[in-house]
Image (cartoon, rainbow, N blue to C red):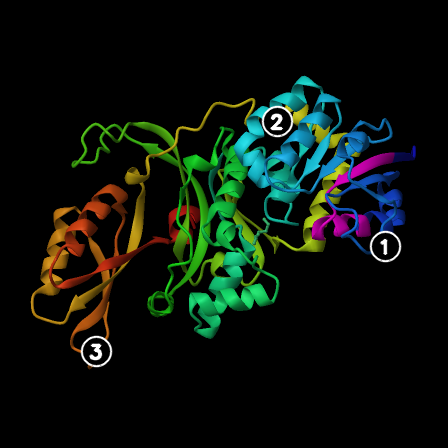
Amino acid sequence: MSERSIGVTLLGCGVVGGGVVNILTQQRDLLRQRTGLTFDIRHIVVRDAGKHRGDLPVPLTTDAAAAIDDPGTQIVVELIGGTTTAGTHIERALKLGKPVVTANKSLLSARGGELFALARKHDTCIAFEASCGGGVPIVESLMKGLLANRIDALVGIVNGTCNVILTRMTRNGWTYDEALKEAQRLGFAEADPTLDVSGRDAAQKLALLASLAFNVGVAESDIHVEGIDTIQPTDIQFARDLGYVIKLLAIAERHVQGVGSKDPHHPGQAKPGEFLNLRVHPTLVHKDDVLAEVGGSFNAISVYGHALGHALFYGRGAGQMPTASAVVSDLLGVALGTTPLAFKQLRIFPDTTPRASVLPFHDLQSRYYLRLMVKDQPGVMGQVSQILGNHGISLSAILQRETDDGQNVPIVITTHRATEGPMRRALDQINALPTITPPTVCLRIIDQPKEFAGG
Ligand code: HSE
């Protein structure tokens, strides 16, 4: 078997870059034994060479153009993040026909179609395993192991920060602020956690995963996004009493809408056909669902294939070495030729597929959890259930605890499957009742084993 040495340039050398250097140097012999390949880090490009310390194999440089252009650079690894500088450097590498390995979900979810097309034009490729699910090999699985399946749904916990916060709130009974502070102290949450807790990071990952799974172009803006920063401990407790755990889920499902499935309040809006339902929001997950057990910074992605049924991809979704593991596996795939071949042959990337037909969010069908703050007086429940009934929404459970306050008491209602549009209109009417203190909390419930697994 032939042995080859591959020249690599690293753009960015933060936490993940350090992990990549670690694997390429510490595991050099293992990688060579397995693949016949050794990787020689030719350049490490950083913004400020004075800031970095540690044992690095080459001197740092700030000249990205020279590093990318160096004929000895055969693969460019982009670990800068963001969409501006990273985008410029990736374009430069692709135009030279050099393959790019990146963890940059922001850039790929915003400009993936364009960059994939650029790579194709210059007969090269982009590898992006580390952009979704950290070290979990979900991109590789969608590009290979799951190819025989029509994917019916992909449901994932893909943001470790949110999962750490929700896990602490659930297990310790903490408030959101307490859990966030602890996550920041432990290094799981950024000083500015907005991208993570708003659900945007998960939406960017979902855009990439759904594109590959359903073979359509998905943009972040196609996805309905709600974050976790308004979740209250009382809802976590009520959910637990009802047998559920609250998780931030990224969901993409095939939705086949029949001719007769029109929303009676908006005739003509619900078009028949096949749509993709795309959303990221806090969700009540049944305690028996495997996703309910996924704690801390772990990620897990449930994929439902028509032939395979349910498969779960579970592992560390962030952090130095897990993410570096994905980057190095991409380097190997590129160098061995398997990734360029797949990139060339498969018609699953957003530059080779049509745009997704996205289900309008008001047509979403789901079960719901509602928490109302009501005046504890006769007739209130009657008014609420009448409004829900008028909108075709059927109640599944009602929970009220005795309180000695007598003023404002929480009532929790779960519903059978209902449609988002009528639910929103019902909530507007409920919130306008003089006996209700708005806003009413409205969360969606997913009962995966029943809805998808098919026994
Ligand atoms: N901030 C992300 C998370 C990791 O918490 O999962 C990088 O995508």
Q: Is there any visible trace of residue 349 in the rendered image?
A: no
The N terminus: image quadrant: top right
Q: Which residue is mark 1?
A: 55
206, 8: nearer the viewer? 8
Taking the view exactly as shown, the residue that stands out farthest to the left is 378
Q: Which residue is mark 3?
A: 402
Alpha carbons under labels 1 and 3: distance apart? 63 Å
Q: Secondary structure at mark 2?
A: helix
Residue located beneath label 2 in the image: 115
In the displayed structure, would residue 113 be above or below residue 378?
above
Indicate the position of residue 358 as horizontal and vertical percent values: 39, 32
Q: Earlier in the sequence, mark 1 or mark 2?
A: 1
Q: Identity of the amino acid at label 2?
A: Leu
Q: Is residue 12 magenta?
A: yes
| 418 left or right, relative to 453 | left
**Horizontal side of residue 161 vs 90, given as left or right:** left
In the image, the residue with mark 2 has its CB under 8 Å from the nearest atom of ligand 1: no
| Outermost residue, right side | 2
What range is drawn magenta here? Answer: 6-22
Q: Residue at x 56, y 30 (%)?
A: 111
